[in-house]
Image (cartoon, rainbow, N blue to C red):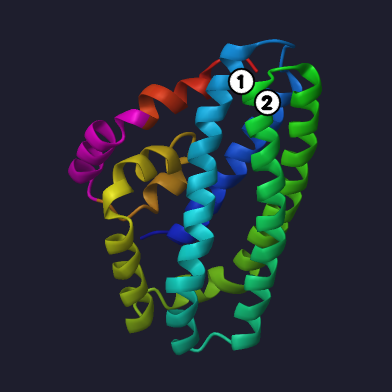
Amino acid sequence: MATMSMNKVIHAAFRRDLDRFAGALDGFRDGDSARAAELGRAWDNFDAQLTDHHEGEHEVAWPHLERAGVATDLLAQMDAEHGVMLGALEEARESMTALRSDPSAARAATARQAVERLRRATVDHLDHEERELEPFYLEHHDHPEVVAMSREFRKRNVSGAGQFLAWVTDGATPEERASIAVPPPVFAVMTGLFGRRYRKDIAPVWRQPA
């Protein structure tokens, strides 16, 4: 039986990537255009995953959770925190784009500061969301609205499921891996075939010295 929700597994992947970017930018060498391009590819994936996650919560998760009994004012707080996070994400996005076009130590330092602001805003929100909603997810995992929510997320993400699974499990703990309700044969095909772009172009970015 899973000991954490899929939501918490995804949150762990966001935390890992933010830590990875912080370390990579701290060690960035002036003029390293190849490293800037690698970090740019990794950033594009992170940006897309975070954007899809918060949009999915607003469009899919919150309506189902509200019908399942989660307080409306709590969900409004979560959306307000998303707004703060998105402002920081836009700033970090601009800084990472600038680093790709000008791979200088100065640009890397600016990007590092922006990523740190994004990390604080994101982690504050993730921590709050887990305190409030993780017990609900675990206790009500078989609630009709929670089941319907999970089904809707699967349909929403079907085209990018392989990329998503390859990303979310890159560096995951055994507990996190065990909480992903995908049969092993299906998981192997999804990550091996449809997740190969992540494995080829993004995962190696984090295997190199920062």
| Secondary structure at numbered mark 2 | helix
Specify start and end residues of the magenta stretch as a single range. Answer: 183-197
Q: Is residue 48 left or right of residue 154?
A: right
Question: Callout 2, which amino acid?
Answer: Leu
First of labels 2, 1 by sequence position: 1
The label on residue 99 is 2
Up the image or down, 39 lies above or below 1; here it is: above
Q: In this view, does 181 lie to the left or right of 80?
A: left
Nearer to me, 107 or 203: 107
Q: In which quarter of the image is residue 60?
A: bottom left
- Count of numbered circles on the image: 2
Q: In which quarter of the image is residue 29?
A: top right
Q: Could you tell me which residue is drawn at 27 percent across and 50 percent down?
A: 159
Residue 3 spot, x, y in % from top left: 45, 59
Q: In this view, does 34 lie to the left or right of 180?
A: right
| Secondary structure at numbered mark 1 | helix
Up the image or down, 71 lies above or below 130; here it is: below
Q: Main secondary structure of the magenta part?
A: helix
Q: Could you tell me which residue is drawn at 69 percent across and 66 percent down?
A: 81
For disc 2, the neighbor class at 10 Å (few under 14, some 14 to 19, many from 20) is: many
Cβ atoms under marks 2 and 1 closer than 8 Å = yes
Q: Could you tell me which residue is drawn at 66 percent across and 49 percent down?
A: 89
Residue 187 spot, x, y in % from top left: 25, 43
Nearer to me, 80 or 130: 80
Magenta-span inclusion, residue 196: yes
Please name the residue that numbered disc 1 is placed on.
36
